[in-house]
C-alpha cells in the first residue's frame, strides 16, 4: 500500500502552493490582459459600427443635399432663362416699335415731300401754261384770274383722269 512519507506530503504541499502562486501571479494577470483586450476589441467594433452608421447617415444627407441643390439650380436656371426670354421679347418689341415709328415718320416725310413737289410742280405748270396761253392768245389776264382759270383746268383734268 501506499505509505505516506514526508517527501510525498511536501511534494503535495509544494504543488498546492505552486498552483496557488501560479493562479495569483500568472493566471489572473493573463486573464486580466485577455479581458482588457476583449473589451478594447469590443469597443473598437462598436466604434466602427457607429462610424459606419454615421458615414451612411452623412451619405444620405449629402445625397439629399445634392438632390436639393440640383433642384434649386434647375429652378434658378429656369428662372434665369425665363427672365432672359422676357428681356429678349421686350427688346424685340422695343426695336419693332422704334422701327414702326421710323417707318411712319419716313412715310410722313415722304408724303410731305411728295405733296410739296406736287405743289411746286402745280405752280410751275400753272405758270408755264398761263404764259403759253397768254402768248397764244395775246391777251393779258390778272394773276388772280389766271390762278382761278388754271385751277379749273386742273380740276377738269383730274376728273377726266379719275
Image: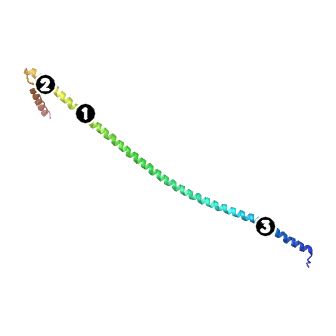
Q: Position of residue 58 (x, y in %)?
A: 56, 57
* 49 vs 2, nearest the viewer: 49
- Relative to 17, 123 lies left or right: left
Q: Mark 2: few, some, or many residues within 10 Å (few <14, many ≥20)?
A: some
| 53 up-or-down from 86: above or below | below
Q: Are marks 3 and 2 in contact (CB under 8 Å)?
A: no
Mark 3 → mark 2, Cα distance in angstroms: 148 Å
Mark 1 → mark 3, Cα distance in angstroms: 119 Å
Mark 2 → mark 1, Cα distance in angstroms: 29 Å
Q: Mark 3: few, some, or many residues within 10 Å (few <14, many ≥20)?
A: some
Helix, strand or loop at disc 1?
helix
Q: Which residue is mark 2?
A: 129
Disc 1 vs disc 3: which is toward the camera?
3
Q: Position of residue 139 (x, y in %)?
A: 7, 21
Q: Position of residue 10 (x, y in %)?
A: 89, 72
Where residue 29 sits, quadrant-wise, is: bottom right
Q: How many marks?
A: 3
| 86 up-or-down from 25: above or below | above
Q: Position of residue 94 (x, y in %)?
A: 33, 41
Residue 27 numbered mark, or none: 3
Q: Which residue is mark 1?
A: 109
First in sequence: mark 3 vs mark 2:
3
Q: Residue at x 53, y 55 (%)?
A: 63
Q: Residue at x 24, y 35 (%)?
A: 108
Residue 8 numbered mark, or none: none
Helix, strand or loop at disc 2?
helix
Q: Residue at x 59, y 59 (%)?
A: 54
| 78 up-or-down from 154: above or below | below
* 40 vs 154, nearest the viewer: 40
Amino acid at each position: 500500500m501506499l505509505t505516506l512519507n514526508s517527501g510525498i506530503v511536501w511534494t503535495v504541499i509544494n504543488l498546492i502552493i505552486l498552483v496557488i502562486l501560479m493562479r495569483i501571479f500568472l493566471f489572473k494577470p493573463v486573464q486580466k490582459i485577455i479581458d482588457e483586450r476583449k473589451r478594447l476589441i469590443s469597443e473598437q467594433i462598436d466604434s466602427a459600427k457607429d462610424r459606419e452608421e454615421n458615414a451612411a447617415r452623412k451619405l444620405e444627407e449629402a445625397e439629399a443635399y445634392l438632390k436639393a441643390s440640383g433642384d434649386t439650380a434647375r429652378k434658378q436656371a429656369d428662372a434665369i432663362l425665363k427672365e432672359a426670354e422676357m428681356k429678349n421679347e421686350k427688346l424685340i418689341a422695343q426695336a419693332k416699335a422704334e422701327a414702326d415709328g421710323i417707318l411712319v415718320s419716313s412715310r410722313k416725310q415722304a408724303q410731305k415731300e411728295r405733296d410739296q413737289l406736287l405743289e411746286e410742280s402745280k405752280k410751275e405748270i400753272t405758270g408755264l401754261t398761263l404764259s403759253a396761253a397768254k402768248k397764244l392768245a395775246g391777251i393779258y389776264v390778272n394773276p388772280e384770274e389766271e390762278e382761278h382759270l388754271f385751277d379749273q383746268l386742273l380740276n377738269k383734268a383730274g376728273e377726266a383722269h379719275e
